[in-house]
Amino acid sequence: MPHDTRSNGRAGGGGRCLAIAACVLALATGGAMTASRALSVQRSQAAPAPAGEELARAAARAIAHGERDKAEALAQARGAGDPDAAAVLARLAIARGRYEDAEALLRPARDASPRGGAALELGLLLR
């Protein structure tokens, strides 16, 4: 069976290719507004923020690959009130040397989820 390369092995990749193709076509024909509309459609079709452990894994993967902005965007999509998102945002703050900010994020998250990732991050920060 031939390999399907349209999605580049990633879930949802076909939509990205379609949006890119629409942008290229629009720009080639002089339709800058159409290109920006195609990009906004692509952004609106983005997957919802991952939940719980999946957020932690996706953020850790992004951080490991040097994509801190991507990790931050994933966490902010969930909001700092979410304990898992707070743990990710705090990890990024620690990496940037903003320890007080990290602690301020982690304490309420630890109280909301005493056995979660935020509690672990706070313990590591305070050791």
Image (tube, grey):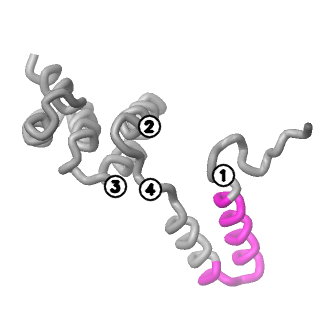
Task: Report how far apart the C-alphas of labels 1 and 3 lie in the structure.
Answer: 20 Å
Q: Position of residue 113 (x, y in %)?
A: 16, 35
> Mark 3 = which residue?
77
Query: With respect to residue 48, does 115 lie above or below?
Result: above
Q: Secondary structure at mark 2?
A: helix
Q: Is residue 37 visible?
A: yes
Q: Secondary structure at mark 3?
A: helix
Neighbours of disc 3 within 10 Å: few (<14), some (14-19), many (20+)? few
Q: Which mark is residue 22?
A: none
Q: Secondary structure at mark 4?
A: loop
Given the image, on which type of amino acid does mark 1 rest? Gly
Does the segment drawn in magenta span residue 97?
no
Looking at the image, tell me whether mark 2 or mark 1 is earlier in sequence order: 1
Quarter the C terminus occupies: top left
Question: What is the span of residues highlighted in magenta in the rendered image?
Answer: 15-34
User: Is the C-beta separation of discs 4 and 3 under 8 Å?
Assistant: yes
> Mark 4 = which residue?
48
Residue at point 80%, 45% (across, down): 5
**Which residue is more in the foreground, 123 or 34?**
123
Looking at the image, tell me whether mark 2 or mark 3 is earlier in sequence order: 2
Magenta-colored segment: predominant secondary structure? helix
Residue at point 53%, 72% (across, down): 40
Given the image, on which type of amino acid does mark 2 rest? Ala
**Which residue is more in the foreground, 69 or 110?**
110
Given the image, on which type of amino acid does mark 3 rest? Ala
